[in-house]
Image: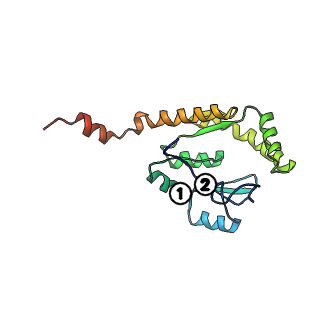
């Protein structure tokens, strides 16, 4: 969809096969990430599954200044920070169809050992409890449907009365002609 971009997060984890630096993630070492935390580079950051992930304030600002809706792919810790600090954000919780489907997807991805998959599944149960703190929930079952639901939310939010430029309404419709 036009005017919508994904913000590439920073992470300390190693790239998975096929992942490209600055496309899927920006891969940095732990010392660099810690320095970025100290320098307040991130709008949100969290340690997830033993690795750090964070979203750059500058990247979000650049995309927003270009008129883009910015999509963040973040965990529940990051979402809490975003909701606290960016009052106009819209949070969408993406659920797998079931825990069994999630387990199958993690196994079929073949990027994590069984121990890591177990940790991720255990963490997923805790994360799912957070769904009610979000504005919307989408079940990630059929990709075409997920995309349509996401686009419907974006379109509805763009038309929400709280996002309409009140000065534009006043100037173009409510000021009396001289």
Q: Secondary structure at mark 1?
A: helix
Q: Are marks 1 and 2 in contact (CB under 8 Å)?
A: yes
Colouring method of the image: rainbow
The residue lying at 66 percent from left, 54 percent from top is 24
N-terminal of the two: label 1 or label 2? 2
The crowding category of the residue bearing disc 1, from other C-alpha atoms within 10 Å (few below 14, some 14 to 19, many at least 20), is: some
Q: Secondary structure at mark 2?
A: loop
Name which quarter of the figure residue 42 lies in: bottom right
The residue lying at 70 percent from left, 37 percent from top is 128
The crowding category of the residue bearing disc 2, from other C-alpha atoms within 10 Å (few below 14, some 14 to 19, many at least 20), is: many
Observer-nearest residue: 115 or 138? 138
Name which quarter of the figure residue 150 lies in: top right
Residue to which mark 1 is pinned: 59
Which quarter of the rendered picture does the C terminus lie within? top left
Residue 41, image x, y percentages:
56, 62
Residue to which mark 2 is pinned: 8
From this view, report whether residue 16 is shown above or below residue 103.
below
From this view, report whether residue 177 is shown above or below residue 62.
above
157 vs 38, left or right, is left
**Farthest right residue?**
114
46 vs 151, left or right, is right
Name which quarter of the figure residue 28 lies in: bottom right
The residue lying at 60 percent from left, 65 percent from top is 36
Residue 156, image x, y percentages:
48, 33
From this view, report whether residue 35 is shown above or below residue 131.
below
Mark on residue 152? none
Residue 25, image x, y percentages:
65, 56
């Amino acid at each position: 969809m036009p005017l919508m971009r994904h913000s590439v997060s920073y992470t300390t984890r190693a790239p998975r096969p096929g992942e490209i630096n600055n496309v899927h993630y920006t891969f940095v070492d732990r010392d660099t990430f810690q320095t970025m935390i100290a320098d307040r580079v991130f709008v949100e950051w969290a340690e997830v599954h033993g690795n750090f992930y964070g979203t750059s304030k500058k990247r979000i600002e650049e995309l927003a200044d270009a008129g883009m809706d910015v999509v963040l792919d973040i965990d529940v810790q990051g979402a809490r920070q975003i909701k606290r600090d960016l009052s106009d954000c819209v949070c969408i919780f993406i659920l797998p169809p079931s825990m069994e489907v999630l387990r199958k997807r993690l196994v079929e991805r073949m990027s994590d050992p069984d121990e890591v998959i177990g940790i991720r599944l255990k963490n997923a149960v805790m994360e799912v409890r957070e769904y009610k703190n979000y504005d919307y929930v989408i079940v990630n079952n059929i990709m075409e449907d997920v995309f349509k639901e996401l686009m419907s939310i974006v379109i509805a939010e763009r038309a929400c009365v709280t996002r309409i430029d009140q000065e534009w309404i006043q100037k173009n419709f409510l000021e009396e002609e001289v």
